[in-house]
Image: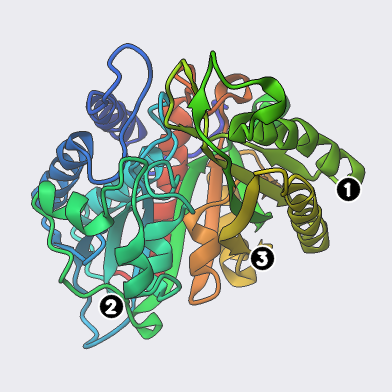
């Protein structure tokens, strides 16, 4: 890639070094040192990360604020009065024992674009806003994409307040504990958003296998997240005969074991995952009386997701009876999303101008970009993931690729903000 063109105003090596420093620092804010990144929303680690992000925004000269969800915004004002903003960013929460790049890479990319605006004394007509979003993963409060859904009004005030983590802590209680203010404004008028750009690691093997540093995302899959509750009857593990038991965990295990078959029957790349399983009362010598587990369904075709949802409901209902009660709640549903054609063309043009190899790619993972796509023009870039790994401590992406993506977003942001 020696023929990649780097403009003097850019300084790829300098940006790459800062990116590595940002990523390394944020990776220290984990509840599981030495075993990946665990940074749940509204945790001590969340507070450490948000303080770092806000500090860097202020150093760049951005106006910093948080909303009633705890999303972070760093704004470079434009010269046009009341003009909509060009947003760049991603999320900064993680899955348990995840990696350092899923989410933070996109936040860091936004910070670096803003740094280049400041370094080159650019004055945008339309404001530039760097955003860091909460609870994209759904690891603490379920559902996922909470920060972006809240911004656009897909998550109501009442629904937000009713959310609890596995320990029964509500969102508002958790916010207040780390000094956040849930009474601040939450929903944002879509008229204040001109465009949204998100950089993310691919979380798959395609770009690395092709030796291509940039993927320009064309579409994002349809996905849903269900929560299944199975209720039985608690009892003593030693004195309750097998034929007298209503064991919630045994019933749940039978359901979960059959879920992969539902995706395989549907085909077309449909996938299904149970990633969370909570057992109550969770005693080694107590028959479980309640189990709650997640069901994540994804496909490039919406009809496949809808079909599997119905099959899951039928499967769960089949195990009702003989002392077992079941229910299914849909926590999240998102249709397949296409990225904006004009922004796609802009990203392809800017990437080509630097002679950076790229390919079009579809996303098999959900992202905040898919939420914003119904409310503003959206574009998204992927960079390669080593060995295609993500959501694990081994997750890694090359900072050089990240710097290339920053360069592309910088040029795109100059065009979209009409900066001079």
Dot placed on the residue nearer the N-terminal end, 3 or 1 = 1
**Taking the image as drawn, is residue 87 in sight?**
yes
Q: What x and y, as percent, mark residue 279?
A: 49, 32
Which residue is painted at 43% across and 34% down in the image?
A: 95
**Element assignment for label 3:** loop
Q: Is residue 127 left or right of residue 184?
A: right
Q: What x and y, as percent, mark residue 364?
A: 67, 45
**Taking the image as drawn, is residue 212 in sight?**
no
Specify the quadrant of the image occupied by residue 105: top left
Label at residue 125: 2
Q: Which residue is mark 3?
A: 335
Q: Which residue is mark 1?
A: 266
Dot placed on the residue nearer the N-terminal end, 3 or 2 = 2
Eyeballing the image, is 63 above or below 32?
A: below
Dot placed on the residue nearer the N-terminal end, 2 or 1 = 2
Marks 3 and 2, Cα distance to the nearest angstrom? Answer: 33 Å
Query: Alpha-carbon neighbours of circle 3 within 10 Å: few (<14), some, or many (≥20)?
Result: some
**Element assignment for label 2:** loop
Pick the residue in front: 183 or 192. Answer: 183
């Amino acid at each position: 890639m020696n023929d990649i063109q780097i403009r003097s105003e850019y300084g790829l090596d300098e940006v790459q070094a800062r990116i590595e420093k940002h990523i390394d620092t944020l990776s220290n804010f984990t509840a599981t040192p030495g075993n990946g990144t665990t940074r749940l929303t509204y945790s001590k680690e969340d507070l450490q990360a948000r303080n770092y992000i806000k500090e860097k925004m202020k150093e760049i000269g951005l106006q910093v604020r948080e909303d009633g969800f705890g999303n972070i915004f760093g704004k470079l004002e434009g010269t046009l009065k009341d003009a909509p903003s060009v947003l760049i960013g991603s999320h900064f929460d993680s899955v348990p024992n995840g990696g350092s790049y899923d989410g933070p890479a996109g936040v860091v990319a936004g910070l670096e674009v803003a740094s280049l605006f400041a370094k080159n004394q650019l004055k945008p007509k339309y404001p530039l806003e760097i955003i860091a979003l909460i609870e994209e993963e759904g690891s603490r409060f379920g559902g996922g994409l909470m920060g972006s859904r809240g911004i656009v009004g897909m998550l109501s005030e009442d629904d937000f307040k009713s959310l609890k983590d596995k320990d029964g802590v509500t969102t508002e209680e958790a916010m207040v504990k780390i000094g956040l203010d849930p009474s601040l404004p939450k929903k944002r008028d879509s008229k204040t958003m001109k465009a949204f750009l998100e950089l993310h690691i691919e979380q798959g093997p395609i770009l690395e296998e092709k030796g291509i540093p940039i993927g320009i995302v064309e579409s994002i899959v349809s996905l849903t997240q269900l929560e299944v509750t199975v209720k039985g009857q608690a009892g003593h593990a030693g004195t309750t005969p097998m034929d007298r038991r209503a064991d919630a965990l045994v019933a749940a295990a039978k359901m979960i074991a059959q879920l992969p078959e539902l995706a395989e029957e549907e085909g077309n790349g449909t996938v299904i995952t149970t990633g969370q399983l909570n057992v109550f009362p969770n005693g080694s010598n107590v028959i479980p009386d309640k189990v709650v587990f997640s069901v994540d369904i994804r496909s490039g075709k919406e009809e496949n997701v809808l079909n599997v949802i119905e099959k899951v409901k039928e499967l769960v209902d089949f195990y009702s009876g003989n002392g077992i009660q079941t229910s299914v709640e849909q926590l999240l549903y998102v249709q397949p999303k296409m990225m904006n054609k004009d922004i796609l063309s802009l990203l392809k043009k800017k990437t080509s101008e630097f002679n950076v190899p790229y390919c079009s790619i579809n996303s098999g993972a959900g992202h905040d970009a898919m939420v914003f796509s119904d409310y503003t023009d959206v574009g998204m870039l992927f960079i390669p993931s080593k060995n295609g790994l993500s959501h694990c401590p081994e997750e890694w992406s090359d900072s050089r690729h990240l710097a290339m993506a920053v360069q592309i977003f910088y040029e795109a942001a100059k065009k979209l903000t009409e900066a001079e």
